Amino acid sequence: MDTITVGTQRLIHLDLKGAPPKLSFFEKFFPFIKDIGATGVLIEWEDTFPYTRDLIQIGGLSNSAEASGAPYTIEEAKQLLELATDSGLTIIPLIQTFGHLEYVLKHDQWRNLREVEAYPSSICPSNSETMPLVRSMIKQIVAFHPNLQYIHIGADEVWHLGLCASCSKRLLTAKHGKATIYLDHVTEVAQYIKENFPHLKIIIWDDMLRNVDVQVLQEYYIGTLVEPMVWYYNNQETFNLGAALWDKYGAVFSNIWAASSFKGATSSCQILPINKHHVSNHDAWLSELALHAGKIINFRGIVLTGWSRFDHYATLCELLPCSIPTLCLCLKTWLSGSSSTETYNSVSKMLGLTENPIQPDVVHRPVVNISSPLNFPGWQILVGFEWFFNVRLKYRNIIDSDQMNTWFNQWQVLNNYTNPMQIETILPVIADVHMEILSLENYLKNHLQAYFYPHTIEELIGTLILPIKQHLRQLKCECEAQMSLGCRIRGHKRLNI
Ligand SMILES: [Zn+2]
């Protein structure tokens, strides 16, 4: 497809609020994505940015980041930007200015700025301390990034609007209800940037504008202030943005972006990306633009989002190294104008996945012994998580098995009412998986430390490995204790195990 239809920008989103990689990863990742066709990166620093002075507690220089081994120092963040620039990638920072501000509003220092006292998601746009904070954050971000052309001010999913006492009062006379509260704040932030950094173009996520009437958007001259980034992560079967949306955005905005996803958009605790879903999302975007690009004055291009968490408090989803094959498939689909069997074959070949190529219909690949290194940064981590997926499946199959539920359930163990004939076959299976998870833990710790900081490794192991390891150890001890007890009558004296 031509560049009028698909634009010229192909950005990769780096969601650093979860599992932010070390520079050793970016050294390899940036040249790699440049080679496969990316033109830039959209960097969502969130709590990893080295904010200073009055904002120091928000980011990588805070006491809590230091205590947990979380990044980034000023030097590291600078190097990260230099590495991206050296690879010829455009850099666009993303900074939330309305919703998804948990990383700021969770601190006591800014708790009074919450729209809803109990929830740290959205900031109150009526509080007189809000704009000074937002301005301060923007100022630090802009000053840190040399040669910026764009800044993304987030503003998606503002769950709580018009709820505090001040905003409720404003709502009583607001001409367009909650849309007024939303647009007043977004335009104030955008105007601040226009006045102080006139060279910057401003991007926002589009979701909060989807249900606002075209006349209201025009009344705010929002099209002269910001460029919407239309995010949509559904697959082809369920992709439904609708013609009316493009009519509206085409009438209001001169410049429009699209956002697809290559990870972090299916299950909120997904371990490995579902290739078929993300490839289909890109096919759907291509079809959508083929239909509606004529309504857009200037389509800038696409950002392939790669979410690391669904929000600040959510657990980690797919890691970046685990998602590189999917990213390659998505970018290849975009550049080719559609996906095909050839997309999967050529990406498998490029990445060295010849023994076990990526298949469209296989969600999780079987673990195979890798005889030669693969051709992408962090491939050992992908191999580790494919291994984890299989070990977890083995574990769940044991726990859910008829044999366990029939002859070794918790009631039976508590009452010492078990038959060694059954335990003799249960124990070796549990012991095997227990040994395997210990090996996997060592493997993951070993390979994760090459590319991730201690706080990420601790979270991953604590979330995924430890609960299984501890449960298997407990079951193993119970098996051994029941074996030593022998077969007894119901209600035999409780063992101390
Ligand atoms: Zn408020």
Image (cartoon, rainbow, N blue to C red):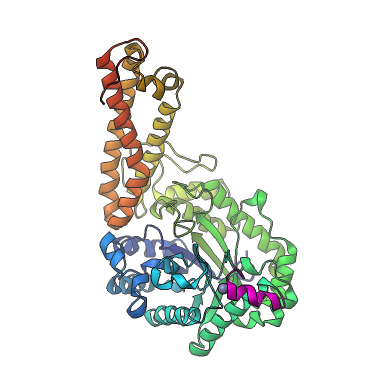
Q: Residue at x 47, y 50 (%)?
A: 347
Q: Nearer the viewer, residue 13 or 479?
A: 479
Give residue 469's position: percent from left, percent from top.
31, 36
Q: Quadrant of the C terminus?
A: top left
Residue at 28% over, 12% down: 486
Residue 207 as seen in the image, left or right of residue 138? right
> Which residue corresponds to the image point at 43% horizontal and 63% vertical from the top-left?
14
Instruction: Tell me where residue 461 appears, x and y as whole percent.
Output: 32, 46
The residue stretch that appears in magenta: 161-176
Please give left or right for residue 7 compared with residue 423 in the image.
right
Which quarter of the picture shows residue 482?
A: top left
Q: Quadrant of residue 204?
A: bottom right
Measured along the vertical axis of the image, is residue 345 above or below residue 262?
Answer: above
Q: Can you give x and y, in whole percent of width and height, for residue 242 in the image?
A: 72, 61
The number of numbered badges drawn on the structure is 0
Q: Nearer the viewer, residue 406 or 442?
A: 406
Name above or below for residue 159 compared with residue 384: below
Asked if residue 87 shows in the view, the reply is no
Magenta segment includes 25: no
Answer with the quadrant where ligand 1 appears in the image: bottom right
- Foreground residue among 405 and 138: 405
Q: Left or right of 24: which side holds 210? A: right
Q: Is residue 60 above or below residue 487?
A: below
The N terminus lies in quadrant: bottom right
Does the segment drawn in magenta span residue 169? Answer: yes
Q: Is residue 291 left or right of residue 482?
A: right
Q: Residue 372 location, x and y as percent?
A: 31, 44
